[in-house]
Amino acid sequence: MKTILAARDSIAQLWGCPRSKDTTYRLMKYLLRVEVEDGILLHNNVTGHLVLLSNEEAEVLPNLPAKPSESMKELIANHFLVPEDFDEYRSVKQLRAICRKRSTGDAINHYIILPTTFCNAHCFYCYESDYPRIHMTEETANKVVEFIDEHHKDKDVELSWFGGEPLVGIERIDQISQGLRDREIPFTSTMISNAYLFDEKVVKRSIDLWKLQRVQVTLDGTEEVYNRVKAYAGVKDNPFERVLKNIELLSKNNIFVNIRLNVDFYNKDNIRVLIEKLGRKYAENPNVMVYLNMLFSDQGYEPVRHSDDEKIELLEIIEEYMDLLKDLKVNREGKKIPSLQYKQCMADDAHAIEIQPDGSFCRCEHENALDSYGNLEVGIFDSQKLQKWREMVERSDYCPECCIYPACYMLRYCMSGNDPCTESIRIRGWSKYREVLRSVYQKSLEDEKDESV
């Protein structure tokens, strides 16, 4: 048995190394199996361990279940083979619970901060369309700095600027950043922005003062579609061209730009045209990456609504377009190797907090900002509301049997928690993962060949 990818230490140590018992063994259900020329790849979707069995070693597999033999020892020790009565579903749930408990602590070092809920764009799908429009005050910004100082526990801090359009509240970004610098609190920042308000001066201060490393910018189509969807107020120039220019400006200054393409039925054909344009413009640019997302349902003043069949159709379109992005070399994001997941996003991260312009706390920017569980004045005052965001949901009765169940993690209150999980979606997912594992193996062979030269 040859290791191609080592198991995740934290998970492997927690799960331990089982000894052989005088019982019959079978394959653990949370595995992916890939046939290659040199044998069979087995991937443990709990630990992330990828191994190659030679054709001779793989001869044990068709004879399972079987009593332990010398050729089975390593497979048993690494949880590829388990006793017939072993309950891996229960074991994964226990591992998750332990990992989640270990990940808690009193340090808060990731802050999503909204300096304003005002925005210079008016997207029809904006989930903040009915939020109150407020700017953060100078007094509240001072309290933000004090709160961070009291709660980061000497750990480096990551700030994520959000809005509204965060650059509409640029004074508070300056103030909070300067306050952290004055207190010698180490920090970096990222931002979600439409990028319209960037210029050379703003980019310079974002580097020097905000320590900005990455910006996410959403595009909804080519010029005509984008300008119509964004509906910027009181502009005289061409917003689409200005935003593309600012993406170029950011990338030239070594600020990484994630371009998010929102895909729905109204723009699916236009998005393909945009992808080809972005491919010509940003191919192999190390500071630009393009990816796709489906619009959230029931959001904004003209909400889109999708049936399960429509969601599946859009997911298929997105998969097709993702392949095109990779071919055009504007997406270098590899599909993640499956392994145990026990955290989804900032909503269930004990070390993260979102601060609204009025100083209140909430867990998810996609939910009602008024549904707060605390504020800068008194801290957390509703721990039950905080804990509800840590509840997991299983989207299908098939979940316990799905081979990638350990790597599939959804929050009950997340907007994507109700997305469909059909047999066809699962089969496509398994197939994609197998292709990733095959490519990882091929890469290991190339590396070995290079080392031998």
Image: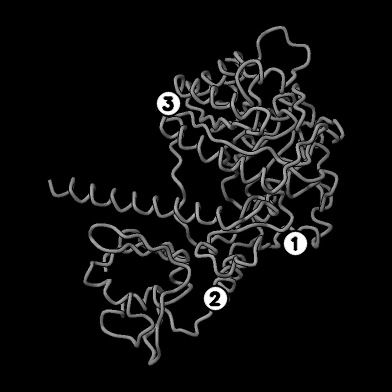
Q: Picture coordinates of residue 375 (x, y %)?
A: 82, 48
Find numbered disc 1 in the image and state the secondary structure of the residue it sits on: helix
Q: Nearer the viewer, residue 191 or 267?
A: 267
User: Which is more N-terminal, label 2 or label 3?
Assistant: 2
User: Which is more N-terminal, label 1 or label 3?
Assistant: 3
**Residue 60 falls left or right of residue 13:** left
The C terminus appears in which quarter of the rendering?
Answer: top left
Quadrant in which residue 423 is drawn: bottom right
Quadrant in which residue 135 is drawn: top right
Q: Nearer the viewer, mark 3 or mark 1?
A: 3
Color scheme of the displayed model: one colour
**Residue 49 falls left or right of residue 230:** left
Furthest toward the top, the residue is: 236
Q: Picture coordinates of residue 80 (x, y %)?
A: 39, 73
Dot 2 amino acid type: Ser
Residue 285 shows which numbered tag? 3
Q: Which residue is mark 2?
A: 91
When the figure is inspected, residue 189 is found, relative to residue 148, above or below; the finding is above
Dot 3 amino acid type: Asn
**Residue 427 falls left or right of residue 445:** right
The N terminus appears in which quarter of the rendering?
Answer: bottom left
The residue at 60%/65% (across/down) is 399
The residue at 30%/79% (across/down) is 72
Q: Which residue is mark 1?
A: 387
State the separation of the CA atoms marked 3 and 1.
Answer: 41 Å
Q: Picture coordinates of residue 49 (x, y %)?
A: 39, 63
State the separation of the CA atoms marked 1 and 2.
Answer: 23 Å
